[in-house]
Amino acid sequence: MIRKMSFILGLAAIVAASGGAFAAGGDPKEGAVKSALCHGCHGENGQSIAPNFPNLAGQKPGYIFKQVTDFKNNHRYNDTMSPMALTVASNQDLKDIAAYFSTQKSMTAMIPGSDGKLLKQGETIFASGNPKTGLYGCVNCHGKNGKGKSGSNQVFPVIGGQNKDYLVAQLTTFRSGERKNDPAGMMGDIAKRLSDAEIEAVSEYLSSL
């Protein structure tokens, strides 16, 4: 297990080292104008209008760039987002849009009410994972409070303050294999070790950050 995790961390470091190139050269001022079509779901400032849409405020620009590119190239699919991604005319437009959302105030989830017990369970999963099932703690890739490991690491997204409904949906699709655009299948492997209750708990915790 130690050997496997060392391999995963080494691979992650290699991928992360090149991640900053995804959105280099983006202009947030241009992106503010070019992102107009995104506002209907993700909000003008990257705070989504509904809990099933992801917040983009403060997200890593390289991560945004990759996800939209994956939607355009059918490496990831969503009924709404896949056709919307095709409206982005050029890589430069996408870099500008990504730069704009990344410079907005850090994302804040829509929280109708938090469950104290779930929060505690989720915090444990986030920090330590589950040794019994070989589940890796989220903090190791997503950083303290889920806000990312560093500015240069564009591969692992900001997830602290993301909407709970969206987090649950993504972890579930990673677990089922429906979503599989993660580097080296890392998230798919991790999600397969999560029970429904653990997905609920860690999503509750992350949305509270």
Image (spheres, rainbow, N blue to C red):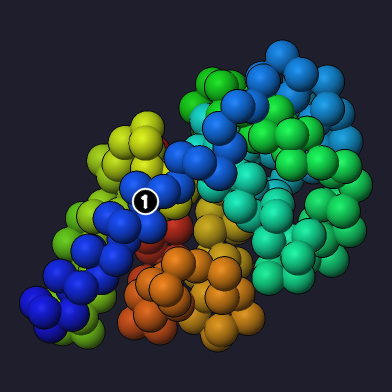
- 154 lies left or right of 89: left
Write the residue at 60% across / 58% down. 165
In this rendering, does residue 90 appear at all?
yes
Seen from this angle, which residue lies furthest left?
2
User: Three-letter amino acid code at disc 1?
Assistant: Ala
Q: Position of residue 28 (x, y in %)?
A: 66, 19
- 184 lies left or right of 108: left
Using the image as rendered, state which of residue 29 and residue 138 is in the foreground: 29
Q: Could you tell me which secondary element the residue under label 1 belongs to?
A: helix
Eyeballing the image, is 65 above or below 171?
above
Using the image as rendered, state which of residue 159 and residue 195 is in the foreground: 159
Q: Which residue is tagged 1?
A: 16
Using the image as rendered, state which of residue 149 and residue 200 is in the foreground: 149
In this rendering, does residue 162 appear at all?
no
Which image quarter is the C terminus in?
top left
Eyeballing the image, is 188 above or below 160?
below
**Which of the 4 image quadrants contains residue 61?**
top right
Q: Position of residue 92 (x, y in %)?
A: 74, 34
**Which of the 4 image quadrants contains residue 52?**
bottom right
At label 1, counting other C-alpha atoms closer than 10 Å, the crowd grade (few under 14, some 14-19, many 20 or more) is some
Eyeballing the image, is 119 above or below 147?
below
Write the residue at 23% across / 63% down. 9
Total numbered labels: 1
- 141 lies left or right of 28: left
Q: Position of residue 18 (x, y in %)?
A: 41, 48
Write the residue at 31% across / 57% down. 14
Which image quarter is the N terminus in?
bottom left
- 143 lies left or right of 22: left
Q: Position of residue 33 (x, y in %)?
A: 83, 20
Seen from this angle, which residue lies furthest top?
29
